[in-house]
Amino acid sequence: MVKRNIYLENVPLKEAYNKFFQRIEELKISPVGEKVSVEKALDRITAEPVFAVISSPHYHASAMDGAAVKSVDTYGAMETSPKQLKLKQQYVPIDTGQPLPLGFDAVIMIEEIHEVDTETIEISSAAAPWQHVRVMGEDIVATELIIPVNHTVGPEDIGAMLAGGIWEIAVRKKPVVTIIPTGSELVQPGELPGSGKIIEFNSRFFSGLITRWGGEPRPQEIVKDEYQKIKEALLEAVKQSDVVLINAGSSAGSRDYTAAIVEEAGELLTHGVAIKPGKPTVIGIVEGKPVIGVPGYPVAAFFILDLLLKPLVYKLQGLTPPRRNIVEAVMSRRVVSSFKAEEFLRVKLGQVRDKMIATPLPRGSGVITSLVRADGFVRIPQLKEGLEVGEKVSVDLVKDLSEIKNTIVSIGSHDLTLDILANLLRLTYPETGLSSAHVGSMGGILALRRGETHLAGSHLLDEQTGEYNVPFIKRLLPDVKVVLMNLAYRQQGLFVPSGNPKNINKLEDLVREDITFINRQRGAGTRLLLDYHVKKLNLDPQEIKGYGREEYSHLSVAAAVASGAADTGLGVLAASRALGLDFIPLARERYDIIIPEEFLETEMIQRLLEMINSDQFKKEVDKLGGYDLEESGKILWTSH
Amino acid sequence: MVKRNIYLENVPLKEAYNKFFQRIEELKISPVGEKVSVEKALDRITAEPVFAVISSPHYHASAMDGAAVKSVDTYGAMETSPKQLKLKQQYVPIDTGQPLPLGFDAVIMIEEIHEVDTETIEISSAAAPWQHVRVMGEDIVATELIIPVNHTVGPEDIGAMLAGGIWEIAVRKKPVVTIIPTGSELVQPGELPGSGKIIEFNSRFFSGLITRWGGEPRPQEIVKDEYQKIKEALLEAVKQSDVVLINAGSSAGSRDYTAAIVEEAGELLTHGVAIKPGKPTVIGIVEGKPVIGVPGYPVAAFFILDLLLKPLVYKLQGLTPPRRNIVEAVMSRRVVSSFKAEEFLRVKLGQVRDKMIATPLPRGSGVITSLVRADGFVRIPQLKEGLEVGEKVSVDLVKDLSEIKNTIVSIGSHDLTLDILANLLRLTYPETGLSSAHVGSMGGILALRRGETHLAGSHLLDEQTGEYNVPFIKRLLPDVKVVLMNLAYRQQGLFVPSGNPKNINKLEDLVREDITFINRQRGAGTRLLLDYHVKKLNLDPQEIKGYGREEYSHLSVAAAVASGAADTGLGVLAASRALGLDFIPLARERYDIIIPEEFLETEMIQRLLEMINSDQFKKEVDKLGGYDLEESGKILWTSH
């Protein structure tokens, strides 16, 4: 029925944007208003200006408890020659907020009144006209503008409107954005997915974005990858929405129907935008409503929504999106970028010394955690080759600058105890964060060398000396003064399927005929550990079947064992737990953190050290099992 | 029953704060958690860290449509010597997202495959291991930390948690803040209040603030000023809340019961805080719950809530309040401040030339519009006498800096046409604002002289020459190069009660025996207009009864007429309409705007001029009636 387009267009973002919004202009798609009660108007956008109906105060009101007087009657009153005033003609008792009787124009405070008798008071200073009086209209004058159109209603606006006698106002109707998740591989959250099945989280992710932009998200049920079903869902959705998103099927694969459906049902404006991530995007109009075919990968989807949907949702509220704050930063690593597209590179920022350092995050468009961890992004223009180390870049911030400045950047080997520290820090000092990137021990030392990180977790065993970390620091960080602090000793061991069917109990079993092994890559701490012990035991690596097969993480090793591709592999307890494997403890290894001396006295790091030395840290780590904290927090070595 | 305390304490803010929060510590008042579905967790604060249950992807997934292969089988394939692969043993067709079969470790894109027959493909380049594969855990590794405790959940976090197999999380329960409005003078919004009655808007204002801080506001019914009733309401409220606010009765007047009630029902910590506005404040603990007696005036209430309740609401969510952005500014006016209290001065900011200029807003604690219009506030320490003109100050921002920089500051005489312009600007350029302060024509010219404003509205008639504005500019702004532009001609006239019972038709009627007049203050444009015409008509001011009685605004004049204190007064149509008076047009006057030349070419002012010359402006002004726009937008005079 439908021809498969193998090729996408590669339309520059600006061109795609202009075409889309020009069409929206032509169709006169514009904001709609609705009435809401002022009390419920918080954070809504006014669709009309609001003018006061009454003044506030709407009469001359006393601002004090005391007596209302006519100022002319008080002239001449002094400490040395007080004046007496008579009830009714010359004074009237009054409380705060009460109206001044006609003809009275000032108030004398109760503290300054001497009561002579029930009908006479004595005063010892004159009252200026309108003294202690809130004159009519002091705050708001009837008919005056309280708030203009296109204004976001704040708490104080609600107060002022009610004070001005306004009970109901016209606000922008929240733009309705319907989200149609498509894909036969999708399953709803709530059930753990089988192999080949994916949890449908995008519609919830998009809903959060749309809510934050002031729209009303309407996520729909999952639609299978069938042309007719998707088309029906789309035609139904455009009737009830201001904008429709189809996610995904927006590329040019055999089951990518979005472009063809939009073309058949309406008008296809663009198929393929020259940005990375985000290329496989469909833009069109169906039944007068804007439709976006959003890429399936969440990071690609994010940028497409941020660049195309956000301005539309704001426009439908009469607004333009707030500009992101921008910060200047220095690239910590080289990034090669394609000529084919404008790239949106997520970066982690760290205030290291006086510089803001930008470190690229994983660039895969399926890595939603790169958005969770991103502090901002750098736009690399289409015709730029990439970014050099040390290059100055402008970063569009997605987090608060103060939050960024209060975050300890940790790059290196990962260990669960770092997560525990991150949580303890947040609990004790809610404004201080610890953000970890997992690139392995060696990656962490290299990040220290480039000045990208405040600390690095490391468990590198030197095969020659049996010493941890120090030989590597000496070799790789000759110019950085650092402190090496132990965080924990932890167990490494062999992963085996639950019940240990092949009865593997020690490293020597790896050379057994019936055992296949799965290894870690060269340079990994765990690989060094294996090689060290293999050598110590005088085993021949050649005899270990699978010694040459390398995986890049604890979890990949565990996965290979879980899937049956190997009988066993070496790693940490947590990875075996994650996949329900059994764990044969083999060796205790030292897991340290390396901290440049210059950061040691900063408030952030001091707080971290306080956490490391806390009882609660010990308690939480004990719960994990497999750890030993006898040297935790101890400085093991410093460079001089 | 209750002794009246005439005097409040004057406890320094820091002391009152520390006493309050120390007591809260002692009582171990701390955050409470509750479970919510991840989909509904947007903007909630995590009460526990969230760890992934499954990896994402949870299997090695193809990242492309094409064929899964074993990379070793592809080695050696080249353009010049392609390789053939056999179905099942060597390749398996695969779509994006599908799992790689066991033993396969790479994907070749469909575009790079040549189909030889149904069971054979040909490739012309080798596949690297894991090419076009999203390896298991690429995004999330089971058991790893997704987000820490005390983290505000964002859209991307929702996506990542669902991807990690988390459907429900523990978040902080929103702190419940009950608000008890007290006061026999209060009436609910929805009915226009009679004299002496005040609309109860504070509880709605507070609710907005509490909502923004993450709390759950529970405004109650109005309680009359009766000791027993307020006490009952408080005792009921503490049972169901985390914090209780009593508004007001927090001062030391005859009907101020809050302090006594808190003392009787629990523990009174502080009564009277040395800040301005905000002094009449009660702080205490009742039944283990923090209770704040909040001042009745909205601005005083705002600062007390901002300083004492906000940190508490955040604390109950495990957080500290975000710090306000701070901007350095220069004071445009002298402000004298009392030694008795730390003052929180609301200011309007304007980027005038390269400087940020801070202009104090009305200081009355009842003026809620000073919060509506405030861009920030300046803290004046207790022992500081005040601020000098030109003094550098730090301003705590309550608005976005970019919003402030995009706002035209207008200080001077007010006219409704300025409100129309403000709205048209917002409609056409949502990011551009026009903020008007109403200080009269002369006040506007003085603001121009001090460099406080981008423009000033003025309608000053020179008695000698009959000329508008120019003589005043020449005299008062000799050093500022300005452009004088007409905005409109408008009608001034006499206000008379509806139906015009005394049959007043012309200015000559003012000298009639049976007529009493109410005048404007010296220097007001309207006073100049009156004097000019009185002189022209050869009337003797001495014969106008009430000529010496001066009011300070159009509305006060109208109010005097409406209340019967005078038979008539002079002013603009809008003020008579506001109070339902009849209007006898008398004279057409010119209303101009004065713009320093240096601002004329700025984008903001150009946009304003575009609005002045727009058809829509003319249309909206025509609707008002009483205006003539024949010279609107015309430059009438420039200084050289």
Image (spheres, coloured by chain):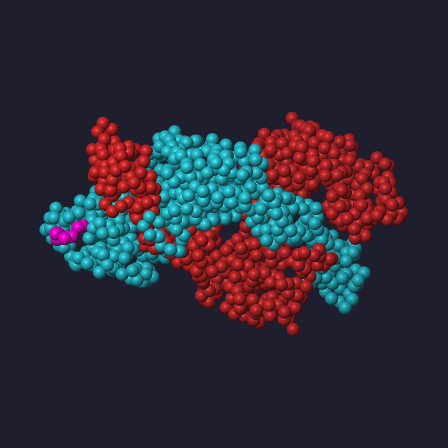
Chain colours: A red, B cyan
Q: Where is A33 relative to A506, above or below? A: below
Residue B381 in which image quadrant: top left
Closer-to-camera residue (A109/B84): A109
Residue drawn at x 24%, y 50% as measured from the top left: B560
User: Where residue B491 sits: x, y (%)?
Assistant: 23, 57
User: In the rendering, at what x and y percent does residue A411 appear?
Assistant: 64, 40
**Furthest residue in direction bottom, as rendered:** A1
Where does residue B201 sit, x and y in percent of width and height? 41, 49
Residue B514 drawn in magenta: yes
How many marks the image carries: the answer is 0
Point 27% across, 46% down: residue: A101
Residue range in magenta is: B510-517
Most foreground residue, A1 or B140? B140
Residue at 17% in and 44% down: B548
**Left or right of B563: which side holds B312?**
right
Q: Residue at x 41, y 52 (%)?
A: B188
Judge whether B533 appears above or below B276 on screen: below
> Toward which corner of the image does residue B474 lie, by quadrant?
top left
What percent of the width, then of the height, locates residue A328?
51, 43
- Is A405 on the left or on the right of B256, as rendered? right
Residue A369 visible to an observer of this rendering: no
Task: Assess whether residue B595 is covered by the magenta stretch.
Answer: no
Q: Main secondary structure of the magenta part?
A: loop
